[in-house]
Image: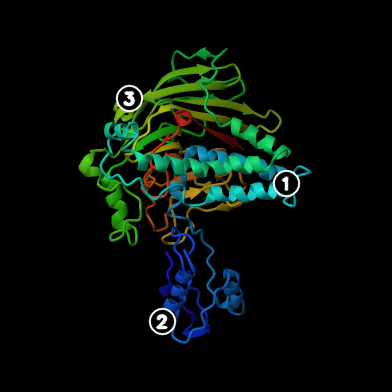
Amino acid sequence: MCTCDRCRRWKLNGRIWANRGICPDQTDNSGPPKNIAEVLLYYEIARSQFPGADVQATPFEDFVEALQPIKDKLPIIDKEFGDTWIEGTASDPRKVAEMRALMRARSKCLEIETGCSLSDNRIYNASVLMLKLGEHTWGLSSVFDSVHWTNDKFYAMLDNKKKNINLTNGVLSWQEQRNFSYMAIDALGSHTLATQMKHELSQIDARKPDITGLVKVKDMLAAQECTNGFSLQFDDEGTVIKEWASASNPIGRFAYQSLNQSDFDYFNGSYPYSKHFQLGIGKPNMSANAKPESKIWKMKMTDLFKGSKCNFVMMATFVDHSCMSEYGCPVSITVEYNAEINQNTGQGGVDITLQWFKKAPTRLPESIYFVFQPVQNTDMSWKLHKLGQMIDPLNVILNGSQRQHAVDKGVYYTDSNCKGLEILSYDVALVNVLTPQHYVSPIPLPLKPIKEVNGMAFNLYNNIWDVNWIFWYPFEMRDLDQKFRFRINIS
């Protein structure tokens, strides 16, 4: 949060280089000034803190311009910053999937096709609306309820139309944020990009896998050999443990995690300022009204089907069904694998479609992952594709986000010749970097740079925030079922 007392002059090597400062007059959540009197008040505050200063209203560009004469004296940081609040983006899986779908269609249109230019007002106006999708505030700051944490009390509040006005307003604010996607499409009018975007959105909806023509596998734990050279094997949870994987290094593990106050105590004791300031990560008064566990819930594979073209459908559920009634785990999941090899190049690929079905909403903290921990190779290292660049997760600045990153294309586990695994994510942005000391967690810790990576987990959803983000999911009936698509390219 920036206030006027943070105005300062640039001081390098003991010398004052620029007798200028910048005083933002608003915090990130406060909105614009209400009237001219408020603006004048900020002027007086700045003058009182810096007697004799010439206080002017100015765009940020003017401040940057004033630094140009001394820019070679300023420190250069070549490390990834990361954002320790980025985990909130996983709180609305559909919004993120739709945003990524629209961005893909727009990028393809601008880069490849004719008749698609920002000089077209339809494209420009749609692009402006799409910018709103990245805003960090995705809803109201709170639903102002620190009592009804358990599912039975929460559902009773949802059913009580008179008492749940704050909960209702929360949902309306989340839906309002989603609507910018649809407003962007409307702004395109009859442009062909609108049709392309609608097609992309149609691919997001979950549907039960079509098992027509597939054979039910009797020995589900046995290795499944394919005529194209692939060989897949699943463990009792439905995780792949062969082909770049093993029992101790699984690929495609679905992990459902419930959290409790111990997880937030760890955060509050380690994150700067959090000991004395509620940053929003946590569920206030939860422990007085609920008894959640901090654990990862075990799954069990229930069915496995195999096709003639090295395509599989794996079905699974949870061993302990109480996670469905007490928390928000889905009733079932399916994972479809379609593996193929290019006979000319010898390179292979696996298309993966993960879906959950009948996920119940809960206000209790939860987090869901799809985990990739391939067999380790000392000649290979992990990279993250962020903002069009390859980022080393070991090269993050102190106090930056070490283990949570939002990626563009996906993650890479390759050698110096770029040979290895390319794991692409179409619908999920948030990635949880795994280390030998730290498994899956939405908590943005540690803050010190990590020294080793042994896998990546795509964070499909979490609700650890209790401010500004989404607090439970689904909040619309259509999101009881959800689809997430991935592809592994092997070279």
Distance Cα–Cα, label 1 vs label 3:
48 Å
- Say which element carries label 1: helix
Name the residue furthest bottom. Answer: 52
Mark 2 vs mark 3: which is more N-terminal?
A: 2
How many residues crowd around disc 2 within 10 Å: few (fewer than 14), some, or many (20 or more)?
A: few
Residue pointed to by mark 1: 111
Q: Is residue 227 visible?
A: yes
Q: Quadrant of the N terminus?
A: bottom left
- Say which element carries label 3: loop
Distance Cα–Cα, label 2 vs label 3:
65 Å
Q: Quadrant of residue 69?
A: bottom right
**What residue lies at 33% left-to-right and 36% top-to-bottom?**
162
Mark 1 vs mark 2: which is more N-terminal?
A: 2
**What residue lies at 43% left-to-right and 50% top-to-bottom?**
403
**What residue lies at 55% left-to-right and 35% top-to-bottom?**
486
Which label number is shown at residue 48? 2
Residue mark closest to the camera, 2 vs 3: 2
Q: Quadrant of the C terminus?
A: top right
Residue mark closest to the camera, 1 vs 2: 2
Location of residue 128 in the rendering, given as x and y in whole percent from the top left corner: 62, 51
Residue 162 vs residue 134, the one in the foreground: 162
Q: Name the colouring of the figure.
A: rainbow
Residue pointed to by mark 3: 319
Mark 1 vs mark 3: which is more N-terminal?
A: 1
Q: Quadrant of residue 57?
A: bottom right
Dots 1, 3 in contact, CB < 8 A: no
Q: Is residue 385 visible?
A: no
Residue mark closest to the camera, 1 vs 3: 1
Location of residue 124 in the rendering, given as x and y in whole percent from the top left corner: 68, 50
Q: Height in image: 214 above or below 448? A: above
Location of residue 440 in the rendering, given as x and y in whole percent from the top left corner: 39, 42
